[in-house]
Amino acid sequence: MFITMALSSSAVIHNHMNINMKRFNMVRVHQELILEIPKSKRPNKATHLAESICNVLHRSPSRSIDLLRYHEEKLSTPTMSPREDISQKWRQIHGCSNWENILDPLHPCLRREILKYGEFAQATYDAFDYDSLSQYCGSCRYNRNKLFQKLGLSRNGYAVTKYIYAMSHIDLPRWLERSLVADTWSRDSNWIGYVAVSDEQETRRIGRRDIVVAWRGTVAPCEWYEDFQRKLDPIGKKGAKVEHGFLSIYTSKSDTTRYNKSSASDQVMKEITKLVKFYEQKGEEVSVTITGHSLGGALALLNAYEAAYKVPNNVPISVISFGAPRVGNITFKQELEEMGVKALRVVVKQDWVHRMPGLVFNEAFKVFDEITSLEWVYTHVGAELNLDVGSSPYLKGGGMNLSGFHSLETYLHLVDGYLSSETPFRNEAKRDVALVNKYCDMLVDELRIPQCWYQLANKGLVCNDHGRWVKPKRDPDDIPSHHDDPLVPDETQTYMMTLVSS
């Protein structure tokens, strides 16, 4: 009953547009930005095949053959499009006009940037040590200098400058991963995210020095979202209130811990303000982009709220979140808007997490304005990009696959294939379809991609010189060390100078 209510509540407003994408050539002029949506390329064999796949859906007996053939044809093609120079239009892509007129239809440059930030959020899952039999459970498996290289994200042109750790004094079941080994790296803290900054080449392409904060969420939130503490705690000085559990994760600290003598809030804000000051003193334009999925999206909004108070007003702050729940009340939303924070929420219609908390009373409840303005009513913030699992011929659309609907890789797949609310899945989508099944079972069986395939070889065991299977020791460079985080000032200065000269 609870899940049924969640799936049926909170009506979402769509902005429908009648568009013929085959003949579409539109130029929108907004402020100083000219965004052109190019004409479709001349149809080829693969395009015709893709269109037939989208049309036949599940009713054609030849669907499995066509879909598998089309997928195999794509195996020898690149997984991403060339990245365009957006230096003259980055403010619009970053949300200065709340992404007006470039969400539906979705502009190609915005799509690529959303995918980039989504991959940064996905990295917090792919590098996280979930193994409860590991003494490093709850940490990142790689040090910050190797993170993007190990995950294949070096191509994005960013470098990690800081790891963030968080703890929780509240009872959120299964959020805080703990090792079952007695001699563990930490019993109180988890790796929760990182700060990264664009390198010289990427900075030229995107038109400014971009500081990114990526927050980790949860792979299976359905295990703990039911236990939401509905309590709202005050934040700021103007009546804003936010969910108690999110705020506790963001602000908790303890002198008895190794990694959280300072809170996640303290760690991230110290790094952001340091980087902003460094690059502004060099005369560069700077932006702050905060991203996260699920719980990470909630933390991203709290981070943006604090950054808006502490970072100079001329620095634009944007949040790109995926499947994020509501965080605070209407005053919280209004304060963020007044401070100029821009937020883009990417949601999937079948995912119920973005409908929580505030299942019944929320910003969509317009019957009584006096109800929606109450301090205990949860309200979403920002613009929304609404996706539908049913739009992709690759995904299983039926059933109650809650973890699959909520998976970040499902979100990124749908973003890659989204053209507009009136058109089918994009033929030119390049992102590897197999990534969808990393942590779930969302791909149709015809593709023959195993479910939950992303794991260490042999579940982390290696065969030693004596023929015995053992758990290997971590590379010393990848062992968490509280002496390395935060960076000492001299080391930070040296690292930044390396970025500048690269």
Image (cartoon, rainbow, N blue to C red):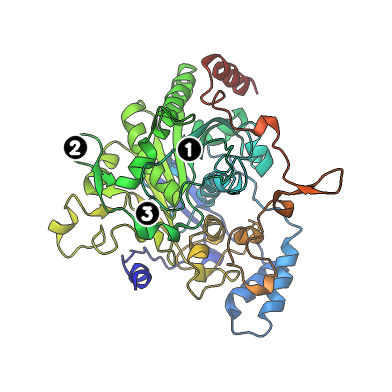
Name the residue type under label 3: Pro
Image spot of residue 149 (x, y percent): 68, 38
Give the residue at x 34% y 64%.
Answer: 12
Q: Is residue 96 left or right of residue 376?
A: right
The answer to whether residue 270 is above or below residue 176 is: above
Residue at position x 45%, y 40% from top?
290
Residue 384 image offset from top left, x and y in percent: 38, 55
Q: Is residue 44 visible?
A: no
When the figure is inspected, residue 181 is found, relative to residue 499, above or below; the finding is below
In the image: residue 318, left or right of residue 379: right
> Helix, strand, or loop for circle 3?
loop
Separation of marks 1 and 2 at Cα, in angstroms:
31 Å
Residue behind mark 1: 189
In the image, which disc is placed on residue 238?
A: 2
- Label 3 to label 2: alpha-carbon separation: 22 Å
Residue 325's tag is: 3
Asked if labels 1 and 3 touch by Cβ distance under 8 angstroms, the answer is no
Q: Which amino acid type is shown beneath numbered disc 1? A: Ser
Q: Quadrant of the N terminus?
A: bottom left
